[in-house]
Image (cartoon, coloured by chain):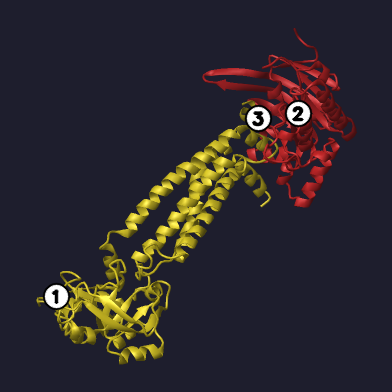
Chain colours: A red, B yellow
């Protein structure tokens, strides 16, 4: 078995440069990162350190300026836009800080959204969405719209949406950043359970040491470079 | 179809804005349908004009009379099968606003020339045998509540009777229907012999002729032959196909088609602005949501399709309601209370309406849809 096969995510020598007017902003430089299958990785670092950018590269939401991003044996940086979208739909679940639910859809319909891209029947979509809502403990709120749910409940719906297609990789961008401690702990419990019981590989960006403590490994990103220790 | 729920939910997001936009679209398509019916009324008969019929009138103008003797001379021209005359009577029934076309004709010849005027055998016989007999089209008979056997007084505005009397009385012996939807069923036709004998002046003269030709392919040559036959006489003629004649007749009021098209174009231009603005706002407000859709696996084209779908659903609903309302209003009757010879929305206008719905949806939605297609996920999620 090759190294890249043992690791779910292999990032090699990745640069990410943003253009702002005539200025080039180097967010990530020569970054290497391997994430083994089944790991719960926390990414920490100051604002603007490139945590979300790295998460976007792993999730195929953005492309590196240089270097390669391999996830599950697929060089996603080389995929066309259409194939990358299809890859995301199959392999990645995304959890956002501000939940990013569709306000016009009920919890059930929000969770069903990724399943619209499959060939599943309406009944099957509904069934799978119900199972996902049950996993996050919200089956009793399936017909509620986001505005009638608390922040914690909305994030649970967001997690249900992320896991409904049974992806291998869960990418969470500050999933507890908008929640109080109690709700945040519940969300972290849920993520831990998904990692331990269902073997989901999770990459979580967070500012919260308390949240990062739930992960099996924590990496710190500063000035575009990764380290295992927080640099002052 | 599985995306329809998503499209529909997005349209319901800003109910007031969607409702106002829908109302604008409904009004535009209602106007399109209704004005189309009025245009059809003014272009009455053009679509159903006989290809094998020519109209021969005085070269100077339609109101100049021609001698009745032209008929036999025209029938001698090669390619001419038959010729019948008509004359504009221009009377009114009871009051000036009760306008409709009245014409003295030779009944038997006329009905042969215009087989699209459907009259029962019994009523045909009655007309042929009743000197003061007249027939009316169904539209006019219904408009005034006439029935066979009624005595109809018509006040002449041009043709006085001998002795100066202006009221002509006719016995209604028949009510005709049209073989086609576009057939004019507003005319009132009476016998020329009765009219010619009783009128104060103009005996032996008629308004214009309808000529049936044996070969429509030869229409131009036969028309030229007819005009050549009467060239350099006191009664020179101008011969043209029936459709062109009817078009010219309609154009005396103005180019109705152009006027209608101008109004409709102005309305639709405004609608494009309104619908386009609605779609642009709808996309701008949802940049983040569209980015999330892309993030969870919707393709660029898929998101573009969703935006265009919203535009199509909104325009489709508004357009369909507008066309149905137009159909309903037209079915209630013409706005002139029966003066228009025909009043209906031609089937081709409904087809045009559907194409227009697709065009408005596409034009209104294309820019926001392209904007959604080009949206970069990482950038949009940062906003």
> Is A27 left or right of B31, judged from the image as shown?
right
Q: Considering only vertical position in the picture, is B49 above or below A7?
A: below
Q: Which is more foreground, mark 3 or mark 2?
A: 2
Q: Secondary structure at mark 1?
A: loop
Residue A45, quarter of the rendered image: top right
Residue B249 location (% of width, % of height): 27, 67
Circle nearer the N terminus (3, 2) = 3
> Is B212 left or right of B139, judged from the image as shown?
left
Q: Nearer the viewer, residue B158 or B209?
A: B158
List the residue tagged with mark 3: A62
Mark 3 nearby-residue class (10 Å; few <14, some 14–19, many ≥20): many
- As measured in the structure, the alpha-carbon distance from the residue carrying label 3 to the one carrying label 2 is 27 Å
Cβ atoms at labels 3 and 2 below 8 Å apart? no
Q: Of all residues shown, which one is farthest toward the top?
A: A232
Q: Nearer the viewer, residue A55 or B162?
A: B162
- Residue at image coords 53%, 51%: B318
List the residue tagged with mark 1: B236
Mark 2 nearby-residue class (10 Å; few <14, some 14–19, many ≥20): some
Residue A231, quarter of the rendered image: top right
Residue B117 location (% of width, % of height): 37, 80
Mark 1 nearby-residue class (10 Å; few <14, some 14–19, many ≥20): some
Q: Secondary structure at mark 3?
A: loop
List the residue tagged with mark 2: A151
């Amino acid at each position: 078995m090759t190294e890249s096969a043992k690791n779910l995510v292999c990032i090699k020598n990745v640069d990410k440069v943003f253009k702002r007017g005539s200025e080039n902003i180097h967010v990530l430089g020569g970054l290497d990162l391997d994430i083994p299958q089944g790991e719960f990785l926390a990414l920490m670092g100051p604002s603007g350190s490139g945590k979300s950018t790295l998460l976007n590269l792993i999730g195929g939401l953005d492309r590196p300026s240089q270097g390669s991003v391999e996830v599950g044996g697929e060089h996603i940086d080389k995929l066309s836009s259409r194939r990358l979208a299809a890859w995301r739909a199959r392999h990645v679940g995304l959890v956002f800080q501000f939940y990013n639910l569709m306000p016009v859809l009920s919890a059930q319909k929000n969770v069903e959204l990724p399943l619209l891209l499959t060939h599943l029947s309406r009944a099957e979509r509904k069934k799978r969405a119900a199972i996902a809502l049950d996993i996050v403990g919200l089956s009793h709120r399936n017909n509620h719209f986001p505005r009638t749910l608390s922040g914690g409940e909305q994030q649970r719906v967001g997690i249900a949406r992320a896991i409904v297609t049974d992806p291998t990789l869960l990418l969470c961008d500050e999933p507890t950043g908008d929640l109080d401690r109690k709700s945040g702990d519940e969300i972290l419990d849920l993520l831990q359970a998904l990692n331990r019981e269902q073997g989901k590989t999770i990459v979580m960006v967070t500012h919260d040491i308390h949240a990062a403590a739930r992960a099996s490994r924590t990496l710190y990103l500063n000035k575009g470079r990764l380290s295992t220790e927080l640099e002052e | 179809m599985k995306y329809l729920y998503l499209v529909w939910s997005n349209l319901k997001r800003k109910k007031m804005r969607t409702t106002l936009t829908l109302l604008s679209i409904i009004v535009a398509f209602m106007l399109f349908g209704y004005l189309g019916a009025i245009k059809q009324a003014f272009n009455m008969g053009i679509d159903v004009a006989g290809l094998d019929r020519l109209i021969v009138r005085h070269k100077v103008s339609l109101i100049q009379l021609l001698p009745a003797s032209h008929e036999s001379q025209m029938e001698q021209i090669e390619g001419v099968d038959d010729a019948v005359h008509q004359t504009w009577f221009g009377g009114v029934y009871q009051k000036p606003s009760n306008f409709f076309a009245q014409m003295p004709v030779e009944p038997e010849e006329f009905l042969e020339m215009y087989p699209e005027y459907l009259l029962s055998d019994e009523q045909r016989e009655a007309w042929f045998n009743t000197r003061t007999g007249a027939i009316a089209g169904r539209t006019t008979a219904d408009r005034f509540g006439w029935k066979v056997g009624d005595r109809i007084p018509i006040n002449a505005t041009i043709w006085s009777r001998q002795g100066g009397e202006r009221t002509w009385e006719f016995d209604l012996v028949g009510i005709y229907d049209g073989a086609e939807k576009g057939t004019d069923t507003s005319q009132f036709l009476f016998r020329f012999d009765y009219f010619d004998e009783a009128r104060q002046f103009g005996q032996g003269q008629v308004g214009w002729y309808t000529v049936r030709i044996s070969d429509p392919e030869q229409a131009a040559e036969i028309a030229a032959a007819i005009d050549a036959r009467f060239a350099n006489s006191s009664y020179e003629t101008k011969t043209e196909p029936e459709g062109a004649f009817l078009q010219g007749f309609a154009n005396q009021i103005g180019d109705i088609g152009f006027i209608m098209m101008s109004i409709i174009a102005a309305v639709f231009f405004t609608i494009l602005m309104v619908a386009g603005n609605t779609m642009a706002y709808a996309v701008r407000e949802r940049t983040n949501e569209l980015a999330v859709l892309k993030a969870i696996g919707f393709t660029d084209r898929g998101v573009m399709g969703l935006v265009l779908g919203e535009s199509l659903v909104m325009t489709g609903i508004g357009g369909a309601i507008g066309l149905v309302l137009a159909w309903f209003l037209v079915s209630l009757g013409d706005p002139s209370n029966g003066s228009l010879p025909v009043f209906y929305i031609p089937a081709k206008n409904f087809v045009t309406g559907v194409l227009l719905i697709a065009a408005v949806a596409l034009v209104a939605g294309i820019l926001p849809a392209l904007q959604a297609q080009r949206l970069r996920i990482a950038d949009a999620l940062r906003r």
